[in-house]
Amino acid sequence: MLFFRSKSQERLGETCTLVSALLSAGFPVIIHYASDKLPPVFYGGISAFIAGLLMFFLMIARRQLHELRIRKAWRPMAMVTLLIIIVPSLLIYSGTRLTSGINTSLLLSSEVLFAILISPWVGEKLTRSKLFGGFFMLHGTGLILYNGTLHLNRGDLLILAGAA
């Protein structure tokens, strides 16, 4: 394992981390405003189409297009596309239209908690630190959402379902 990287590798890593953080932070804001202008199904479809197109061109650039000929991979790819991209996106985009951008952002952080809860069923070890981290994330989100009363509307529940 390399412990020392060149400056250009460090700079690339820092740039990718910054872009990732900006995209993650901007995602709830963008989908909140876009859901006011476009129907959630159309917005979700356009988003998935653009992402698929970019991945197609990336596969061409990396000369990996031959991997699409592997028929055994089609079913897992279809299941990932349906259950990890299409259904959650539709739930999240539809829920965002019915709630605030702040609630969207906070409720999307519950993905981490759901991943922790599901991890024992996929063979990952559940440690005490993961449980504490998940508990404190849930507790912090609940404290922020609680403004005298804890009221989750339909949009909040759709976003939670999409995150799960």
Image (tube, rainbow, N blue to C red):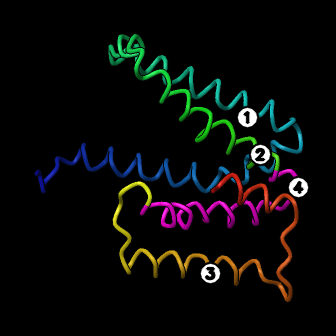
The quarter of the picture where residue 144 lies is bottom right
Q: Label 2 near label 1: C-beta < 8 Å?
A: yes
For the residue marked with disc 1, what is the amino acid? Gly
Q: Which region is colored magenta?
A: 95-120
SS of the residue under disc 1: helix
Crowding at label 1, few (<14), some or many (≥20) Cα neighbours within 10 Å?
A: many
Q: Which residue: 65% across, 60% down? A: 108
Which of the marked residues, 1 or 4, is nearer the chain's N terminus?
A: 1
Residue 2 as seen in the image, left or right of residue 52: left
Count of marks placed on residues: 4
Which of the marked residues, 3 or 4, is nearer the chain's N terminus?
A: 4
Q: Which residue is mark 4?
A: 98
Q: Label 3 near label 2: C-beta < 8 Å?
A: no
Residue 110's spot in the image, x, y percent? 61, 65
Which of the marked residues, 1 or 2, is nearer the chain's N terminus?
A: 1
Residue 111's spot in the image, x, y percent? 58, 60
For the residue marked with disc 3, what is the amino acid? Gly
Q: Which residue is mark 2?
A: 93
As measured in the structure, the alpha-carbon distance from the residue carrying label 3 to the one carrying label 1 is 29 Å
SS of the residue under disc 3: helix
Q: Which residue is mark 3?
A: 140
The quarter of the picture where residue 50 lies is top right
123 in magenta: no
Q: Which residue is mark 1?
A: 44
As measured in the structure, the alpha-carbon distance from the residue carrying label 3 to the one carrying label 4 is 22 Å
Above or below residue 73? Residue 101 is below
For the residue marked with disc 4, what is the amino acid? Leu
SS of the residue under disc 4: loop
